[in-house]
């Protein structure tokens, strides 16, 4: 038994690591040994605690005190004041309006969250098998192996109502049942950890923060379907996740939780890690399977589905990381408990990566059916700087944008789909009134053009054409009929593309046209970007009544297009301006504004150039 | 590991290691670790508590600390807080007294009245 009196949990999710968590950990080791406290205090690296915006964060038990934005310089004070004298450091605690919040569990960010998949993330040491077992780990597997038939295990999943968390929302038990019913000597289970949506990091945090849970989930699936071999397909950009899963497999093997005759039964299982090379399309299950086989990671037509002919032609279940993470808890707490959360069609909880213009960015797990308003304003803390909410993008490049009128929509698979967005894997990008929706659509289209594998023409050519039109619109060269053309192309690409990438790639464009058509029209007809984002569709203007003639803007202009004097004040030469924004940044009296629309000098100049070109021709 | 019983054994041992993060605590020992407490040997007192608890394998006892309590002349001061009972405060503690408190109060449930300086909140 240990002499420890304090557990210091330092969040070592990738967010906090990049904010300097490892340096803080080293500093703690140094200061503790200097003061002779090493034997009394446990330093534990945990997975992502969630509130990434406050990073690096830590929680100190037994009191459960939460510190945010800790720097290596703060370490000495924490040790001498908190650890030695028992006086927690107030200034590192969370301030909510005029209240100081000391306890981890009272942080408002956690209040509406229900942690199932993330239960251990940020609470246990992910590199310790013992800590996972202490929280009830591998009990589900042991019980299922010794007391249930595979069919009974599938029935538990069926009763729980669990659906795939990777985006599609296919009922998990149906996938399992199909493979279970196939009579084959070899079957496989694959964990899809090829998370590629911009701004999404749910799977990474789960793999890094609680690897044994995913492994146990995979084995529960393997037992139910009769597979003896599993593969973790994790993208190479997640080195820590790969390391932790490999370590978890080793630890499980050492104690006999993997290998032959697990829990003294006939069940034998081996798992391996395969790394993806960074292609977004490899998150598509057929492409993923080919990638594991050593082939080019391209999708192939379905059917046959992987459940019939998957990896090396054998029946295969491909489950997302989060789907597997839910399984151990479903088996321990029961299907009824799980299905008591959520809506009629979508049960349980969902992990989301909250990003964008909100106060509390980070990783959250909320019950299905929560409204977008609760998620964005209660959990996310509302918009930065009190700005107005404009739109929320759900489901990454496959999803769509919803607006303020949808804030009270419950989050579940069907409701989101009906409104042109989708659950997706769980990326949530919140945007304030300063975001240009045409530009957002262009960003996602650019991503999909890059990531299209090029196998089927609708996706390869169609997306590129859509991108070209969007690019023209944002450059002020939009034409009458562009919106209709985008819709026509989008609908066609959706219908006839081979795989999910192409079928869903037009969604961001179609949904922004649906809800923000006026912005597209302003870009095309008025040649104006009212959010002042698209550089070709706004201009800078110096307000002479506010200008003090200090000449700073003129001196900082990289193209020397600002002229004037102290008496006459300064003016921007619009034709040469490159819209870098330097002048606006340096102006000491904020006399420079962005004005939507093209300046008359510029349009006149453009016309002149066209005429000249016509004369030369 | 071959059976659920084996798993349970590992779990119980591991839960023991993680008890600081749990909530199954019967008695909480709060050592006053202000400047005067430390000057009078509160660190030694706390270490002795930790050692004794460890040696006796007391799994439901938690040692924590607090700052100055205002009883400077009686330092080191230690509170024993038991669920549903009035708080007991011991003063002028030494490692030897700690050993006695652990045996009498924590293990056998008999308050060592000779060392008590206050009770209740």
Image (spheres, rainbow, N blue to C red):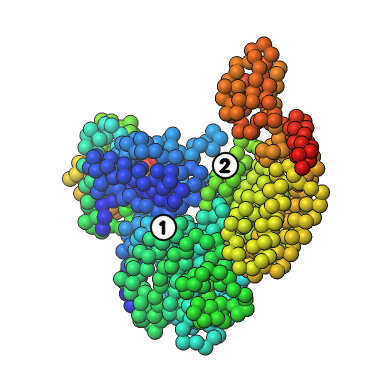
Extreme left residue here? Answer: B96
Decide which of A285, A317 is in the foreground and name it.
A285
Q: Nearer the viewer, residue B59 or A298?
A: A298
Q: Quadrant of the C terminus of chain A?
A: top right
Determine the residue positioned at 44% across, 34% down: A91
- Residue A175 occupies quadrant: bottom right
Residue drawn 56% across the image and 25% down it? A556
Marker disc for residue A359? 2
Give the numbered dot on residue A506: none
Q: Quadrant of the N terminus of chain A?
A: bottom left
* Chain holding disc 2: A
Where residue A288 sits in the image (x, y, percent)? 52, 69
Does residue A251 appear to the left or right of A445 in the view shown? Answer: left
Name the foreground residue: A569 vs A33.
Answer: A569
Label 2 sits on a secondary structure element that is: loop
Q: Position of residue B82 (x, y in %)?
A: 36, 50
Please give the residue where the numbered disc 1 appears in the rendered image.
A239
Between discs 1 and 2, the one toward the N terminus: 1
Residue A406 showing in the rendered view: no
């Amino acid at each position: 038994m240990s002499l420890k009196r304090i557990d210091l949990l330092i969040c070592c999710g990738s967010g906090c690591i990049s904010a300097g968590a490892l340096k803080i950990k080293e500093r703690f080791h140094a200061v503790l040994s200097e003061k002779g406290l090493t034997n009394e205090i446990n330093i534990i690296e945990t997975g992502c605690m969630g509130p990434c915006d406050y990073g690096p964060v830590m929680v100190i038990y037994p009191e459960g005190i939460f510190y945010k934005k800790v720097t290596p310089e703060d370490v000495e004070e924490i040790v001498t004041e908190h650890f030695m004298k028992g006086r927690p450091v107030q200034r590192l605690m969370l301030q909510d309006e005029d209240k100081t919040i000391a306890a981890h569990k009272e942080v408002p960010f956690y209040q509406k969250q229900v942690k199932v998949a993330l239960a251990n993330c940020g609470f246990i040491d992910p590199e310790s098998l013992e800590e996972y077992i202490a929280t009830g780990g591998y009990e589900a597997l042991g019980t299922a192996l010794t007391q249930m038939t595979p069919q009974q295990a599938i029935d538990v999943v069926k009763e729980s109502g669990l659906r795939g968390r990777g985006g599609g929302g296919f009922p998990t038990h149906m996938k399992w049942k199909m493979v279970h019913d196939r009579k084959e000597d070899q079957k496989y289970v694959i964990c899809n950890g090829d998370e590629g949506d911009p701004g999404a990091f749910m799977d990474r945090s789960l793999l890094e923060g609680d690897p044994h849970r995913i492994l146990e989930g995979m084995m529960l699936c393997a037992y139910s379907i009769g597979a003896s071999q599993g593969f973790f397909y994790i993208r190479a950009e997640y080195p820590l996740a790969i390391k932790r899963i490999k370590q978890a497999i080793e630890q499980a093997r050492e104690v006999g939780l993997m290998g032959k005759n697990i829990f003294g039964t006939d069940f034998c299982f081996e798992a391996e890690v395969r790394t993806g090379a960074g292609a977004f399309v490899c998150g598509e299950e057929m492409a993923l399977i080919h990638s594991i086989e050593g082939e080019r990671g391209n999708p192939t037509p379905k059917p046959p589905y992987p459940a019939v002919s998957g990896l090396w032609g054998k029946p295969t279940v491909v489950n997302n990381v989060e789907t597997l993470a839910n399984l151990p808890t479903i088996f321990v707490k029961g299907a009824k408990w799980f299905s008591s959360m959520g809506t009629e069609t979508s049960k349980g909880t969902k992990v989301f990566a909250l990003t964008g213009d909100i106060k509390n960015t980070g990783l959250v797990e909320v019950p299905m059916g929560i409204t977008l308003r609760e998620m964005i304003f209660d959990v996310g803390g509302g918009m930065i700087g009190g700005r107005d909410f404009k739109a929320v993008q759900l489901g990454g490049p496959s999803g769509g944008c919803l607006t303020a009128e949808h804030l009270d929509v419950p989050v579940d698979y069907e409701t989101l789909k009906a409104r042109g967005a989708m659950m997706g894997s769980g990326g949530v990008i919140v945007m304030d009134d300063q975001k240009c929706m045409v530009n957002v659509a262009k960003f996602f289209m650019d991503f999909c053009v890059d990531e299209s594998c090029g196998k089927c023409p609708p996706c390869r050519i169609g997306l590129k054409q859509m991108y070209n039109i969007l690019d023209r619109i944002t450059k002020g060269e939009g034409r009458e009929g562009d919106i209709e053309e985008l819709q026509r192309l989008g609908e066609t690409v959706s219908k006839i593309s081979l795989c999910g990438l192409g079928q869903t790639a037009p969604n961001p464009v179609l949904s922004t046209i649906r809800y923000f058509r006026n912005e597209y029209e302003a870009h095309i007809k008025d040649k104006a970007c009212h959010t002042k984002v698209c550089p070709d569709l706004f201009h800078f203007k110096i307000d002479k009544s506010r200008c003090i003639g200090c000449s700073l803007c003129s001196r900082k202009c990289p193209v020397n297009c600002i002229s004037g004097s102290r008496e006459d004040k300064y003016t921007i030469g619009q034709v040469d301006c490159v819209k870098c924004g330097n002048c606006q940044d340096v102006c000491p009296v904020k006399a420079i504004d962005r004005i939507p629309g093209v300046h008359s000098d510029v349009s006149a100049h453009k016309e002149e150039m066209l005429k000249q070109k016509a004369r030369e021709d | 590991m071959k059976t659920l019983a084996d798993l349970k054994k590992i779990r119980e041992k591991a839960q023991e290691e993680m008890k600081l993060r749990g909530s199954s605590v019967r008695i909480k020992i709060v050592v006053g670790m202000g400047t005067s407490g430390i000057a009078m040997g509160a660190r030694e007192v706390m270490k002795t508590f930790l050692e004794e608890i460890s040696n006796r394998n007391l799994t439901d006892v938690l040692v924590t600390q607090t700052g100055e309590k205002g009883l400077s002349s009686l330092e080191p001061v230690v509170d024993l807080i038991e669920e549903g009972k009035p708080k007991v405060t011991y003063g002028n503690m030494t490692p030897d007294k700690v050993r006695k408190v652990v045996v009498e109060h924590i293990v056998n449930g008999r308050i060592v009245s000779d060392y008590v300086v206050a009770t209740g909140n």
